[in-house]
Image (tube, grey):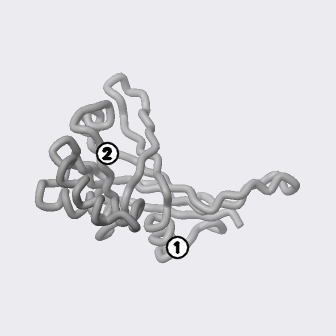
Amino acid sequence: MFKEMRRKDKEITKDEIEEILTKGEYGILSTINDNGYPYTVPLSFVYYNNSIYFHCAIEGQKLDNIRQNDKVSFCVVTDTEVLAKKFTTKYKSVVVFGVASETDDDLKEGILFELANKYSPQFLVEGKKYIQSAKDKTKVIKIDINHITGKAGK
């Protein structure tokens, strides 16, 4: 169903993949628009219990696309450095293929807290208050991972 990675010499381990997903600052979500064109958007995310989660408004293009086609791709790139003299770039990257769905309310608050813990760990008390005030205006989407690859240019 999924092609094998062509550049096996750049393939990274499962542990390295998990490190990138855990430490990555942002990811790029790709969905398919109703006109057949890809729609990509950068977003904050958390890797939790072998899935990817992100939050969004209660309506919008991402949600419309996911509702019509729940298959998505998600990419995270870290540790980039342009090596101009060598005409190349150092990087680590992960590409995920999965199925996106809205989480239920029981999981929603926990994931919002995980996002606060990742991005604002020094403000968790304030984060809990913010979650309580914003949770009804927020959706949390889970990506169940079906296939994942990782590579690095060193």
Disc number for residue 130: none
* Residue nearest the observer in this picture, 45 or 133: 133
Q: Is residue 117 visible?
A: yes
Q: Position of residue 112 (x, y in %)?
A: 26, 58
Mark 2: give few (<14), some (14-19) or many (20+) Cα within 10 Å. some
Quadrant of the image containing the C terminus: bottom right
* Residue sitting farthest toward the right: 85
Question: Which residue bears the numbered disc 2?
Answer: 71
Q: In terms of image quadrants, where is residue 93?
A: bottom right
Question: How many C-alpha atoms fall within 10 Å of the one at disc 1: few (<14), some, or many (≥20)?
Answer: some
Q: Which quarter of the rendering shows the N terminus?
A: bottom left
Where does residue 153 sit, x and y in percent of width and height? 68, 63
Asked if residue 82 lies left or right of residue 30, the reply is right
Comes first in the chain, label 1 or label 2: 1
What's the mark number on residue 16?
A: 1
Q: Residue at x 58, y 67 (%)?
A: 11
Q: Residue at x 63, y 64 (%)?
A: 152
Which structural element holds mark 2? strand
Residue 125 picture location, percent across and down: 28, 65
Q: Amino acid at mark 2?
A: Lys
**What residue do we see at 17% from left, 61% from top?**
107
Q: Is residue 1 visible?
A: no
* SS at circle 1: helix
Residue 74 percent coordinates (x, y)? 43, 50
Amino acid type at mark 1: Glu
Residue at position x 30%, y 54% in the image? 143
Q: CA distance from mark 1 to mark 2?
A: 24 Å
Instruction: Tell me if residue 35 comes above or below residue 136 in the rendering.
Output: above
